[in-house]
Image: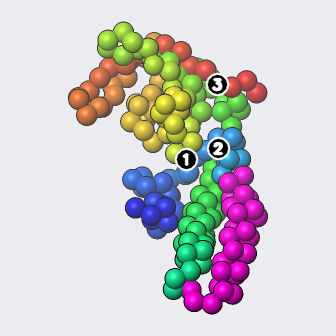
């Protein structure tokens, strides 16, 4: 699937009803803005310069620099369109500003116990910020959805491919304001 096709017609997150907000943390928003600036201000002008130089050499059909440059320009332009749409529809939520710190909401870092007594810690972040290896899960992920609004001591049901698992919320943390 192309990045352009990831959002539905309304520009909402894939798999969610149209009009659903596109949440992200301030850090996630800043990372997308930085990527957009880098692509548009730094990388794209350099590629345009190479393409113009390669085009001036004549026969474009066998000119690898020209063909690669045009392909790279399409990739950059596609990513720029994607980033602009994401940023236009983003709803930045600062977890440090959360006042109800006894419940799980967007931006919370949650430690929970699984049925096998292992403990897992995850931080609930925006879709583009998710990185399972670093313990950052999207707010749309099944575990995040199961944990939403839970409090310490609550048992919540998590649907997994292996079946339903009960997990217990052990701790909830938010960044300091």
When the figure is inspected, residue 21 is found, relative to residue 168, above or below; the finding is below
Identify the element where label 1 is drawn. helix
Identify the element where label 3 is drawn. loop
Q: Residue 144 carries which label?
A: none
Q: Which residue lies furthest to the bottom in this view?
A: 58
Q: Quadrant of the N terminus?
A: bottom left
Q: Which of marks 3 and 1 is nearer the N terminus?
A: 1
When the figure is inspected, residue 117 is found, relative to residue 72, above or below; the finding is above
The CA distance from mark 2 to mark 3 is 16 Å
Q: Residue at the location (53% across, 15% down)?
A: 171
When the figure is inspected, residue 11 is found, relative to residue 61, above or below; the finding is above
When the figure is inspected, residue 64 is found, relative to residue 87, above or below; the finding is below
> Which label lies toward us, 2 or 3?
2
Q: Mark 2 points at which residue?
A: 28
Q: Could you tell me residue 18's position as x and y percent?
A: 45, 59
Q: Could you tell me residue 67's position as x and y percent?
A: 55, 77
Q: In which quarter of the image is residue 78?
A: bottom right
Q: Mark 3 points at which residue?
A: 174
Query: Which contiguous range is marked in magenta?
Result: 34-60
Q: Mark 1 points at which residue?
A: 128
The answer to whether mark 2 and mark 1 are in CB contact below 8 A is yes
Q: Could you tell me residue 143's position as x and y percent?
A: 41, 31
Q: Could you tell me residue 106's position as x and y percent?
A: 57, 35
Q: Quadrant of the C terminus?
A: top right
Inspect the magenta stretch and tell me whether residue 36 lies in it: yes
């Amino acid at each position: 699937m192309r990045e352009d096709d990831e959002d539905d017609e309304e520009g909402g997150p894939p798999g969610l009803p149209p009009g659903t907000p596109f949440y992200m943390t301030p850090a996630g928003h800043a990372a997308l803005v930085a990527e957009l600036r880098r692509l548009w201000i730094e990388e794209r002008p350099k590629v345009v310069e190479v393409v113009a130089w390669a085009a001036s050499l004549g026969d474009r059909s066998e000119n690898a620099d020209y063909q690669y440059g045009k392909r790279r320009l399409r990739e950059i332009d596609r990513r720029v369109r994607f980033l602009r749409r994401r940023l236009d529809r983003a709803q930045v939520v600062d977890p440090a500003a959360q006042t109800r710190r006894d419940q799980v909401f967007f931006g919370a870092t949650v430690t929970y116990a699984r049925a096998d007594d292992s403990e897992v810690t995850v931080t609930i972040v925006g879709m583009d910020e998710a990185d399972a290896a670093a313990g950052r899960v999207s707010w749309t992920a099944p575990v995040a959805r199961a944990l939403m609004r839970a409090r310490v001591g609550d048992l919540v049901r998590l649907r997994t491919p292996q079946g339903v698992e009960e997990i217990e919320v052990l701790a909830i943390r938010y960044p300091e304001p």
